[in-house]
Amino acid sequence: MSGDQGFHGTLIHSPSPEAITILEDTLIIVSDRGVITRCDANISRDTLDRHLAQYAPHIQSTAVKRLPTYSFLTPGFVDTHNHAPQYPQRGLGQGLHILDWLSQLTFPNEAKFASPTYAHRMYSRAIDTFLQQGTTTASYYGSLHGEATKILATLCHAKGQRALVGKCNMNRNSPAYYSDASATESLTVTEDFLSHVHALDPGGDLVRPILTPRFAISCTDDLLTGLGHLAEANPDLPIQTHFNEAQQEIDATLSLFPASNEADLYDHFRLLTPRTILAHCTIMDTEHEYDVLKGRGCGVAHCPIANTTIGGGFMAAPIRRFLDRGINVGLGTDSGGGFSSSILDAIRQAIVVSNAREAQSDGNEKSLSLDEVFYLATLGGAKVCGLGEKIGSFEVGKELDAMIVRPNLVLGEDSEGKEQVLRDDDGVMTPVEVGDDIRTVWEKWLVSGNDKNIAEVYVKGRRVKG
Ligand code: GUN
Ligand code: FE
């Protein structure tokens, strides 16, 4: 028998931002390499075995997971911006302006990752937590340490999380105890890290390296120049940095460089490419900056929780404007900068922030729908990470990164009006009532569920939770 497996029941995904697609009575088959080989609709439970015998005789009936009513399979979440070493400081220091938050809280915390033992312990728990929350792909910032960041990449690979992992480059405007010694040293450690990840996962099947200048404030000209050259020499290498996050940060940045805006600054150093992920992008004052981002094909990591907690202000990023211009957007948790590493929380906050943006713009920038935000959390994020052809939706030829969602409370009543409890597990999600359609269940999960409702998680077909 092959190692192929199948799932039968309801599938929900977002092939396009406009509306989710619900596929009921669907059979999806996944090869032992994690690739979706069939996706057949309109197969009732009664005809499933017959269908398998005819179209997939190499699969045992027992290798097909039958999803119960009110459960569904949906793509795993993509977190396009997550500082892995900030896992133990999530939620702390809220209200501090960004540069104060970095110096008072974040640099002392990240410096602890100089210890490989500490890094191994903390990263191991961080990845477990993120997988538990349904994050099947993350674009990670590591700390500045080469060794710790290798540990992060190795653990992602071993635990089966898809990831972009970057050694954080920072050689100025940070304390001596937490700074790369020089541009040369920063680049040498980066190249050594790239070699490590290429040896770990030569095809980049699961884990890939990403260039990670922290932000221009913490990088000298020669470091940014060197990273731009590295990116040019390695055309597949993705790049991530923070971009137009907060006024305090923008003012400090522009005082250090001759450029009059951050788009021109990073473009000058050739760091804006179709593989570049720009975190935050909350303050976009000129059409020119949109034009540069669009022209270079950069993606935006929208981090609505961090943007409304740290940083100094309620910074509502203009997501509708990015989408209207065809700029790819995904969701990010930021981990430390916000209070949560859950993409479910980021989804809710993205709705809140987009409502604020609509009000601030006198209705010109229409708020985002739940369907649109779900798209950002899945296929939108996959595109931002350069993985849009590989994951993010259920299509034959893509790999299966997915989760099984299960409401914890399902209630009905009998003919005499007496309560019937069909399911009562641990959890707080809005109760599902018998007769709810599957879209309602999906909405109830997105707005009120949590990781307890994420029963199983799969990356590249491998079960990593449940
Ligand atoms: N800008 C530079 N470093 C950071 C960071 O760690 N978090 C956030 N939110 N912004 C940054
Ligand atoms: Fe960040």
Image (spheres, rainbow, N blue to C red):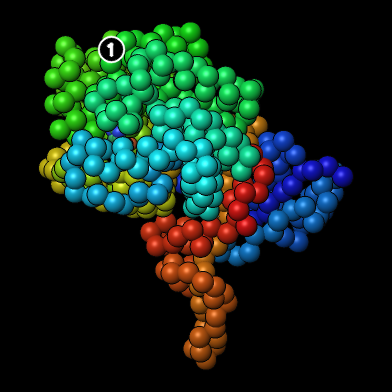
Q: Quadrant of residue 83?
A: top left
In the displayed orientation, state which residue is furthest to the bottom. 416
Q: Is residue 329 visible?
A: yes
Near-viewer residue (425 or 87): 87
Near-viewer residue (47 or 79): 79
Give the residue displayed 51% in from the left and 50% down from the top. 125
The location of residue 69, given as percent across then percent down, is 60, 65
Give the residue displayed 27% in from the left and 22% down from the top. 172
Q: Is residue 452 above or below residue 305?
A: below
Q: Is residue 166 visible?
A: no
The location of residue 229, given as percent across then percent down, is 41, 8
Q: Quadrant of residue 179?
A: top left
Q: Secondary structure at mark 1?
A: helix
Specify the quadrant that holds the N terminus. top right
Q: Is residue 17 above or below residue 370?
A: above
Q: Is residue 463 above or below residue 34?
A: below
- Specify whether 250 is left or right of 67: left
- Specify whether 289 is left or right of 434: left
**Dot 1 alpha-carbon crowd within 10 angstroms: few under 14, some 14 to 19, many 20 or more:** some
Q: Total number of numbered labels?
A: 1
Specify the quadrant that holds the C terminus. bottom right
Give the residue displayed 32% in from the left and 31% down from the top. 177
Near-viewer residue (297 or 358): 297
The location of residue 295, given as percent across then percent down, is 33, 15
Tell whether circle 1 marks a residue whose Cβ is less than 8 angstroms from ligand 1: no
The location of residue 321, given as percent across then percent down, is 25, 32
Quarter of the displayed picture in which ligand 2 can be seen: top left
Mark 1 is on which residue type? Asp
Near-viewer residue (436 or 192): 192
Give the residue displayed 37% in from the left and 37% down from the top. 111
- Specify whether 183 is left or right of 230: left
Instruction: Tell me the residue that label 1 is attached to.
Output: 221
